[in-house]
Amino acid sequence: MTERPAFFETKIEYLKGVGPQRAALFNLDLGIFTYADLLQHYPFRYEDRTRFYDISQITDPECSGLAAVQLKGRLRHWEIVGEGHKKRLIGYFSDGSGTLELVWFQSISWLEKNLRADGEYVVYGKPVAFGGKFSITHPELEILSEASDRPENESGGHWQPVYNLTERLRKRHIDSKLIARLQRALLEVSLSYIRETLPDSLIQKYRLIGKKEALWHIHLPANEAALHQARRRLKFEELFYNQFRLIKQKLIRKTEYAGQVFTRTDFVGQFYKDHLPFELTNAQKRVIREIFEDMRTGKQMNRLLQGDVGSGKTIVAFIAILLAIDNAAQACLMAPTEILAEQHFQGLKPYAEALGLKITKLTGSTTKKERRRIHEGLLLGTVHLIVGTHALLEDIVQFKNLGLCVIDEQHRFGVAQRAKLWNKNQGVYPHILVMTATPIPRTLAMTLYGDLDVSIIDEMPAGRKPIKTVHRYDSHRLAVFGFLREEIRKGRQIYIVYPLIEESEKMDFKDLMDGYESVSRSFPEYQLSIVHGKMPARDKDWEMQRFIQQETQIMVATTVIEVGVNVPNASVMVVESAERFGLSQLHQLRGRVGRGAEQSFCILMTDVKLSKDTRIRLETLVRTNNGFEIADTDLKLRGPGDLSGTQQSGVVDLIIADLAKDGEILKVARECAQAILEDDPDLILPQHAPIRDHVETVRENENNWARIS
């Protein structure tokens, strides 16, 4: 059992055709160190080499616009023309049906030494017409051969894998063809070591090909059908083990980690009866029931609460907090910024005090004297609820009995930081409720949070009018400013947001200050606030309070106001240089308005020159307010790695599956993993031996259990 994994851990330099020098390049440029690494360096696309064209076919005007083509013929002669940077080698290639020019601007000296006059070659490249002549610039050129190890060279009829490479590898003559040859050599010696990792029941039920066959055809597909089956098998396996790991973690938590039992609901009932300011939506009621069920089981809750901006997550969290306090426990609510922590504190304080509960706030700005008082109150249990920032994570912050941790905008916090809160209670872990207003597509949620239970608030409170979103070019600025003036006259307030990108803070800061001066000149009769990340927290809070209290009519800001600021009287969000923002971030910014009963607007300002993806982003924002639809579009445009705000294992370690395209495979793979773990959690049944053997031999630190071990 140990022999097989040891084989795949063999250093790549020992593979025939590699050696120490090439191995060093593979290590450095591609992260390939072992046989396993090379086998799982999958092609990212394939070139269709299934047929040879005649030159007469590609030079026929009716056949113009062909993509890359494969030709077979003779290189009659060549010459060097031009001087300096225009110097080039032109070869004249013929196949009996016509003649074509092959052009090289680089490696001219090497080509002169190695080209064979009147030699037979296979040529591959994209033909381009210029000045009445057809040519291929920097074609792939290979001597025509009937060697037994390269039968496809003579007959065509194959799919050429294309691998990720670096410029340094290309300069050392390491190309996709060489890697394909190395893959063939490795597959031929490793087939006897590759074992099946999925049970027969799954292979038969979903008509999957075997692991050996899949690895062969992903690198050396016999035809398009074989390639499709190889991809399908490897994607299923990867997503199956991704979900198997996450579901296993969830089951371990649910069976091994005890949680406090919360059954009393006195404060909750009093709050519903006397203080709840509005009727809860059906979605909120459903989520509250899910949370209550978790907290009554005696098992530690780990639940993600997902809901669009303004859907009412905070009031749901407060009701969960009341359940903890009802049962002689304390609660904490952690937010990523002081502005958001202050908003939560001010929003929840009237409710807590009306119920006779002690609520306090702890941030980086809290004085030493106040901190001592807070620490004492937490230890004595006289503080029931604490709202704060990262300051809550400090070791000195201890509780008498912490029963519930609520983490807002959880993607702003790392796993280690959340674990610190988890360990604040001695004996029994506190229940965890993490919240996000960043809509996450279902496929991404399965991989990011597959070990959590997920609740979704998919209904907006009654009376909220959908935000009207429009896209305007910079040339429309006067008309936009006229509209803003009309809104201010109605008593409304305006946000104007400028981008802030870390790589160019100085430039963006200048954009902000230039924008502030421009807005000041355009609206001399109104008061302005300005907020940006370089300001001291005290100054930011002061400016925000002026805006909240309607002392200022326009807030000029960077994305520091993206998360959580709640000003019901603000009815217009203007996003400058909207092309520089991601789709999810634009949706978050838009959510800062639309919090009152009045009609709100979002105006996306851009330059007239926009990329195709940018236009799709803006058109999506204009068309819909549905955060989940927006998140799906964002996933398709950007891929999964960046959507969570930080890269997280379970997503970035996928090597062949694509969450934007493989949602159905993921869904089936998760259902299979769930069913197997429910039926046989310890994998003791004989039919599950392939899974058990595979999991046991995977490296402990390997997140992707589908990888060759």
Image (cartoon, rainbow, N blue to C red):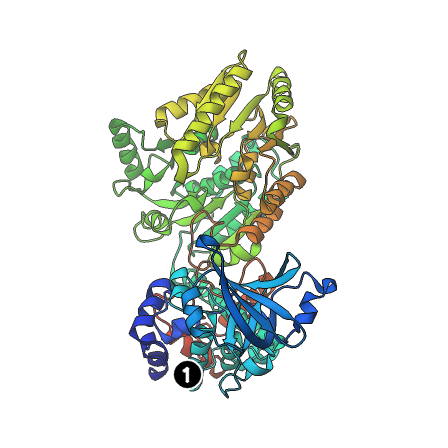
Q: Residue at x 57, y 55 (%)?
A: 442
Find the residue positioned furthest to the bottom. Answer: 148
The residue type indicated by label 1 comes to Ser
Q: Position of residue 658 (x, y in %)?
A: 54, 61
Helix, strand or loop at label 1? It is helix
Residue at position x 31%, y 47% in the image: 424
Q: Position of residue 575 (x, y in %)?
A: 55, 32
In the image, 188: left or right of 75? left
Residue 107 can be seen in this image: yes
Q: Quadrant of residue 458?
A: top right
Q: Position of residue 643 (x, y in %)?
A: 49, 49
User: Is residue 338 in view from this perspective?
Assistant: no
Q: Which residue is mark 1?
A: 190
Which residue is at the front of the view, 410 or 290? Answer: 410
Q: Residue at x 41, y 60 (%)?
A: 167
Point out the image quarter for the C terminus: bottom left
Snapshot quadrant of residue 278: top right
Looking at the figure, which quarter contains the N terminus? bottom left
Q: Is residue 226 left or right of residue 556?
A: right
Q: Is the residue 343 above or below the residue 4 in the image?
A: above
Q: Is residue 429 above or below residue 489?
A: below
Q: Is residue 157 above or below residue 552?
A: below
